[in-house]
Amino acid sequence: MSNILKKMEIFDRFVIGSAATHPDELGHIPHRLSREKLAREGVPLVPHRARLMTREDGETYDLLIGMDEANLRDMKRIVGEKNARKVRLLTEFSGEGREIADPWYTGDYDSTYEEIAKGCSALAAALAAAGKP
């Protein structure tokens, strides 16, 4: 998402974060195969380590984006009823509204990348058109 917004020259209008809903990968960098896929696509890796999503994220961010229904359910539980309306499925923005499979389980990093790129491009276009998040 950061890369797309930078290419659109609107990155400075947004605050983007990344957080996990479970502590499995806390403190780790992105998976090696994910890093390799991004490198092949020419997408610079945004330096970060996994952190746990908090209730405060619901107050901080205008949108909270998940990849599948389990993510959405967990995110809504974490941020609480007040901010649950901010939780959205990424593919809603590309008009598909379906879950994105986790390549950790499928091994298909190419399809996952394409689906995420399509969703992020559609979300970025919607944000740019709206003039705000």
Image: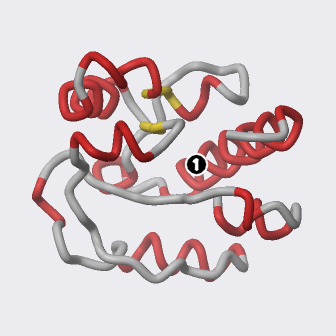
Please give the name of the residue rendered at 53% of the width and 78% of the height, measured from the top-left corner.
46
Above or below, comparing residue 55 to residue 35 in the picture? above
Which color mode does the image show? secondary structure
Please give the name of the residue rendered at 39% of the width and 31% of the height, measured from the top-left corner.
68
Q: Position of residue 132 (x, y in %)?
A: 75, 40
Look at the image and tell me in which quarter the N terminus lies.
bottom right
* Tally of numbered discs: 1
Q: Position of residue 24 (x, y in %)?
A: 11, 59
Answer left or right for 123 relative to 80: right
Q: Position of residue 16 (x, y in %)?
A: 54, 59
Answer left or right for 38 relative to 47: right
Answer left or right for 20 relative to 9: left
Answer left or right for 77 relative to 58: left
Please give the name of the residue rendered at 57% of the width and 59% of the height, measured from the top-left corner.
15
* Residue identifier under label 1: 111
Above or below, comparing residue 41 to residue 66 in the picture? below
Q: Position of residue 73 (x, y in %)?
A: 26, 23
Q: Residue furthest left?
A: 23
Please give the name of the residue rendered at 48% of the width and 38% of the height, measured from the top-left corner.
65
Amino acid of disc 1 = Ser
Assign a secondary structure to mark 1: helix
| Residue sitting nearer the eye, 14 or 1 | 14
Above or below, comparing residue 43 to residue 19 in the picture? below
Look at the image and tell me in which quarter the C terminus lies.
top right
